[in-house]
Image (cartoon, rainbow, N blue to C red):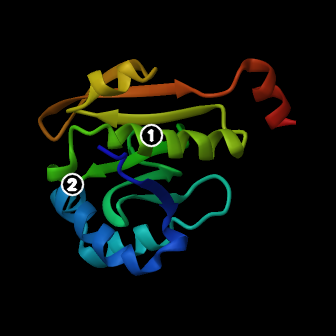
Amino acid sequence: MPATPISILPISDRPDLIPLITDWLWTAFWQDLGQDRAQTRDYVASGVSASGPPQTFVLLVDGSPVGTATLAVHDLAERPDLTPWLADVFVLPEARGFGYVGHLMDAVETACRDAGIATLWLYTHTAERIYAKRGWETVAYFERGGQTNALMRRDLLPEAECREAES
């Protein structure tokens, strides 16, 4: 069986997908946080930085969008001191189980390395094990919305490269 063509593009390459990505994220995450669709759309549309955050990525399989992830400046109001974040990772339910989330993580991590970003953050209440398998470290747990969440970090650059990126 031939391999399925997979590509990941920045949303700036496919602005026509902003309404679709907005619907996915609003339904999956943002609606429950009290954010309206217009705010979610503005957030998705702002993810067009050429380097560093914010950047929104879209995963295409056979040319059809099936997932998204964002390199965000902030994602957790309780921790404004931490930046940047892997945020809004979403894969359509019918496309789950094929490893697509790994491709999305790779895209965001590559964007961080390319920008000289040493550490990336995320929080999750459902996928701690998935992230841990990919090298993420749980640094704390916290309660939010009646759920226990894991605060996780991923160190992306060796210490020497971090010093070079800071200078």
Whole-percent x and y of residue 150? Answer: 30, 26
Q: Quadrant of residue 20?
A: bottom left
Q: Is residue 14 left or right of residue 92?
A: right
106 and 4: which one is in front?
4
Q: Amino acid at mark 1?
A: Met
**Which numbered circle lies on residue 92?**
2
Whole-percent x and y of residue 85? Answer: 48, 43
Whole-percent x and y of residue 3? Answer: 37, 46
Q: Is residue 50 above or below residue 110?
A: below
94 and 117: which one is in front?
94
Whole-percent x and y of residue 77? Answer: 39, 46
Q: Are marks 2 and 1 in contact (CB under 8 Å)?
A: no
The residue that label 1 is drawn on is 105
Q: Earlier in the sequence, mark 2 or mark 1?
A: 2
**Which residue lies at the image location 41% right of the left edge and 54% below the top edge?**
5
Q: Is residue 61 above or below residue 139?
A: below
